Amino acid sequence: MTTNNTTTQTDPTPAETDHIVELSGVDSGYGDVQVLDDCTLHLDAGEIVCLIGPNGAGKSTVLKTVFGMLTPWDGTVSYHGRDIGGMAPENIVREGIGFVPQTDNVFGSLTIDENLRMGGVARDGGLEPVMDDLYDRFPLLDEKRGAKARTLSGGQRQVLAFARALVMEPDVLLIDEPSAGLAPNTAQDVFGHVEAVNELDTAILMVEQNAVEGLGIADRGYVLDQGTVRFDGEADTLLDSDEVSKLYLGG
Ligand SMILES: Nc1ncnc2c1ncn2[C@@H]1O[C@H](COP(=O)(O)OP(=O)(O)OP(=O)(O)O)[C@@H](O)[C@H]1O
């Protein structure tokens, strides 16, 4: 690991790992443009982990590489210890990893109910109990089952996007910038929903531009810069770090 980790000295990666998701020495990119450079990070059961860093650092590229939208050029991406690098997204969903992209994460012309059912097309049955459970957990979706998704507010759409990903009952959810484009109060609500999803035993790897808010709900964080992890540690430690604050939080 080539990180310049000055925030914590005590986070050794065990040789025999029980991380749910682990990137180890990953290089990845688009065409011949390299974005991730020896990127190493992990997600453990029950955690919310937040990726922060400047525009273009490669945060979304991490999620796309875990979700099989990009094949790592080098290094490994593993899920429960199994190499999933380059596995097709439809198979990754079946494995138990969900992805909520930043944009276009619901079908506006479909109803809420149809959106949720679309989220379950890869299921082998058992859809109705899961739908019932999600409607119990997200009453605003229940109330608007028959409404077109395009009629929802930005925050409500995010909730639908989370619920849609949860139809597959993932144990990992990758979330790209959940607060993007939302007013501060709405963003707070959405972060509350991220925490609620996490409480359902879903580990979350989240990219967030709003670093203070994102780290505020996270257990741990990674600061990515130019495709490489520059800092990692407990979320509170990163928030308290003068160096991280000065370089990446505008402090
Ligand atoms: N589909 C693509 N094709 C080519 N280059 C891309 C593509 N998507 C992203 N990039 C480039 O990869 C680099 C990293 O992008 P990425 O979206 O991962 O950054 P980020 O850290 O998530 O930043 P942002 O907050 O701006 O989205 C950027 O230089 C971006 O222009």
Image: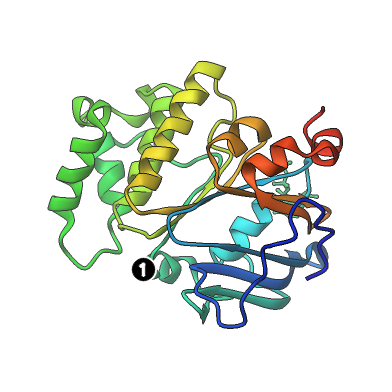
Residue that appears at 48% across and 53% down: 47
Picture layout, residue 74 above or below residue 168? below
- At a point 78% along the width and 41% down the height, the residue shown is 55
Q: Quadrant of residue 85?
A: bottom right
Mark 1, Cα crowd under 10 Å, few <14 / some 14-19 / many 20+, is some
Q: From the viewer's perspective, is residue 33 above or below residue 81? A: above
Residue 239 drawn at (x, y percent): 70, 37
Element class at badge 1:
helix
**Quarter of the N terminus within the rendering:** bottom right
Residue 69 at least partly seen: no
**Which residue is at the far front?**
10
In the image, residue 187 above or below residue 89: above
Where residue 19 appears, as percent x and y from the top left, is: 52, 69
Q: Residue at x 80, y 40 (%)?
A: 244
Q: Amino acid at mark 1?
A: Arg
Task: Name the quadrant containing residue 45.
Answer: bottom left
Q: Position of residue 226 (x, y in %)?
A: 84, 54
Q: Nearer the viewer, residue 91 or 186?
A: 186
